[in-house]
Image (tube, grey):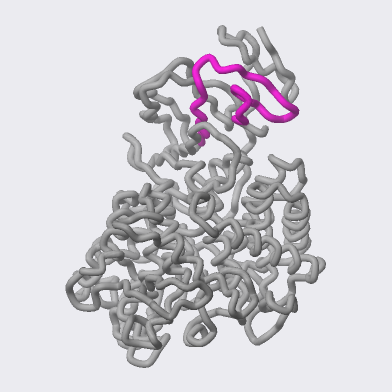
């Protein structure tokens, strides 16, 4: 019998029955904002996000789609940065700045095309060879080498970029395309030319962190001249988390210790902030990096502040930005991400999808947040369906009569408590709407339907599955854990009920042993097919399916099976 000392008790690793006292489960940390959310949001319905994501791809990328305002893709032959035509995707339905007839067909955003490429990839679609087209290679044109910034940006050229948000003046818009690109790159390492672009981005971000030297108190950064800049937009210190995420991915790919050093330095800079600096998307990536660096690099970041800053809605400059909580006229909207204060609260589709990208895999590296993240995801997965017209009651939509135009795959940009449009002031909360008509003169009411946000649906589609118990989800912790080491299938389950439940866990045809990183023990041996897992009320399990009768060993604080890390605590 092999026994290892852990947390003051004996952890039995033998294949025979263990007669020692069971290990102490991982203490669960509380996120105050999540604690305010309902245990079972109402009305409860978890839609098939996987199927919706695949339907979005086949519909949005249909060049022959018919009907008003379709198709939503077109060819851009301007060939900026790389000598190839690329496909543009509308930001919102019939945005008058975009399409082949406007601005030379050049105005399209990487938030839309990269987000849709990543989303489709996550649900099993090969975007590098789809009906003979390589949509992954097309993304190279967002690499702004003509401007000498030599990073991915939201547009291909400043000639049209100033027509829209961001681009060289709003830091998150400039950094976020690089997180999207690196995640796509992880899935398509074979696509020619991506290596050199990823390397250039890593070099730019390393140089930028060195110039910033522990001070990210700026609005944006000029990556061509390596100069920080300030304008009327909020200072965005949490861009440090964006730098850190990309740099750690680069370290995992290229093994250059400079990238690891810069990633840690950037995250240390953000951790030292005396107040919440959450601006748009980066803070939850800081939380993931803190947990992952602690696990893999033996750092000692405090994960809780990053999570509190993500959820609490109390940033100093971006007032109210965080995660919404509430039941508005019988509809629970808790879990969606955006402004907690704008007209009573205004959550956004893209931000809700994208928060799951870092927060769900965080639990792999720090299972002390399994209960909190499991509860948040249940609320977010339930509320996010209300962005889509087929799931939101007509009396809570601005343009329900235009529902058919979405073809069932495009949602409203946001959900707001009190509409920002006078003509919809009579609608009771929650109100599904979008900001598209405010962006450009002539934008029609259907521009409230968000193509850019809807394209990110594959994040939810790759993570969320329902189980035999309504309200208990299976969350895939590997789906958005990019540039990770080899891992066994890992899933988070959270039981929101007060009473115990038996959850059917699909295991597959090969026999496995199941380790739970929350209870710190093997909960099943030599199982295949379906395993019935008993879960106490208000508890979480993080199940790892390891090879049956695998070789178990401990390396420091790590538990390994056949030399693959199963748990870090």
In the figure, is residue 497 to the left or right of 21?
Answer: left
On screen, residue 17 above or below 153: above
Q: Is residue 551 magenta?
A: yes
State which quadrant residue 240 falls in: bottom right
Query: Overall secondary structure of the magenta stretch?
Result: strand
| Residue ID at (26%, 62%) | 59
Residue 493 in percent (x, y) is at 46, 37
Which of the pair 344/9 is nearer the observer?
Answer: 9
Q: Nearer the viewer, residue 269 or 377?
A: 269
Where 546 sits versus 405, above or below?
A: above
- Residue at 48%, 83% in the rendered image: 164
Q: Is residue 182 visible?
A: yes
Check the picture and name the quadrant holding the C terminus.
top right
Query: Residue 381 in magenta?
Result: no
Q: Is any atom of residue 332 visible in this view?
A: no
What span is colored magenta in the figure?
540-566
Residue projecting furthest to the right: 213
Question: Quick one: quadrant of the N terminus?
Answer: top right
- In the rendered image, which quarter is residue 224 located in? bottom right
Numbered-mark total: 0
User: Residue 335 placed where, x, y %?
Assistant: 46, 57
Q: Measured from the top left, where is residue 8 in percent x and y?
A: 75, 22
Q: Residue 65 at x, y = what percent?
A: 21, 69
Instruction: In the rendered view, tell whether residue 266 sits above or below residue 296.
Output: below
Give the camera-side residue of 343 and 183: 183
Q: Residue at x 47, y 69 (%)?
A: 111
Which residue: 36% across, 22% down?
A: 509
Residue placed farthest to the front in the image?
Answer: 83
């Amino acid at each position: 019998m092999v026994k290892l000392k852990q947390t003051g008790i004996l952890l039995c690793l033998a294949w025979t029955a263990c007669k020692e006292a069971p290990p102490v489960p991982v203490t669960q940390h509380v996120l105050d904002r999540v604690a305010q959310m309902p245990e079972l949001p109402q009305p409860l319905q978890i839609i098939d996000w996987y199927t919706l994501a695949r339907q979005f791809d086949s519909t949005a990328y249909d060049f022959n789609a018919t009907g008003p305002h379709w198709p939503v893709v077109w060819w851009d032959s301007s060939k900026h940065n790389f000598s190839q035509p690329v496909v543009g995707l509308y930001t919102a339905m019939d945005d008058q700045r975009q399409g082949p007839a406007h601005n030379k067909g050049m105005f399209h955003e990487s938030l839309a095309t990269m987000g849709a490429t990543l989303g489709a990839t996550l649900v099993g679609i090969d975007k590098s060879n789809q009906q003979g087209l390589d949509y992954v290679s097309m993304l190279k044109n967002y690499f702004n080498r003509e401007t000498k910034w030599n990073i991915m940006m939201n547009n291909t050229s400043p000639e049209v970029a100033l027509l829209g948000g961001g681009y060289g003046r709003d830091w998150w818009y400039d950094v976020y395309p690089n997180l999207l690109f690196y995640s796509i790159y992880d899935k398509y390492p074979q696509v020619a030319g991506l290596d050199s672009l990823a390397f250039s981005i890593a070099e730019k971000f390393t140089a930028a962190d060195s110039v910033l030297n522990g001070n990210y108190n700026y609005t944006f950064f000029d990556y061509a001249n390596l100069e920080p800049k300030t304008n009327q937009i909020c200072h965005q210190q949490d861009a440090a988390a964006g730098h850190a995420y990309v740099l750690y991915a680069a370290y995992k790919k290229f093994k250059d210790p400079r990238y690891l050093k810069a990633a840690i330095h950037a995250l240390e800079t953000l951790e030292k902030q005396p107040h919440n600096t959450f601006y748009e998307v980066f803070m939850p990536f800081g939380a993931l990096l803190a947990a992952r660096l602690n696990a893999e690099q033996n750092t000692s970041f405090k994960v809780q502040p990053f999570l509190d800053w993500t959820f609490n809605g109390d940033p100093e400059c971006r007032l109210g930005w965080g995660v919404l909580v509430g039941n508005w006229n019988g509809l629970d909207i808790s879990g969606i991400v955006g402004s907690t204060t704008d007209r009573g609260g205004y959550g956004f589709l893209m931000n809700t999808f994208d928060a799951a990208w870092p927060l769900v895999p965080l639990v792999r590296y720090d299972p002390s947040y399994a209960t909190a993240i499991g509860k948040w995801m249940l609320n977010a997965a339930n509320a996010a369906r209300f962005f889509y017209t087929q799931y939101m009651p007509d009396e809570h939509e601005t343009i329900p009569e235009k529902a058919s135009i979405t073809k069932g795959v495009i949602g409203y940009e946001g959900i707001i408590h009190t509409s920002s449009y006078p003509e919809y002031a009579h609608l009771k909360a929650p109100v599904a709407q979008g900001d598209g008509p405010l962006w450009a003169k002539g934008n029609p009411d259907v521009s409230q339907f968000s193509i850019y946000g809807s394209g990110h649906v594959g994040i939810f589609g790759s993570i969320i599955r329902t189980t035999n118990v309504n309200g208990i989800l299976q969350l895939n912790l590997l789906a958005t854990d990019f540039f990770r080491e080899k891992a066994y299938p890992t899933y988070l389950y959270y039981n929101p009920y007060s009473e115990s439940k038996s959850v059917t866990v699909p295991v597959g045809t090969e026999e496995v042993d199941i380790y739970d990183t929350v209870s710190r023990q093997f909960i099943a041996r030599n199982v295949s097919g379906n395993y019935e897992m008993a879960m106490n009320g208000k508890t979480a399990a993080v199940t790892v399916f390891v090879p049956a009768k695998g070789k178990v060993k401990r390396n420091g604080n790590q538990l390994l099976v056949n030399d693959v890390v199963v748990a870090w605590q």
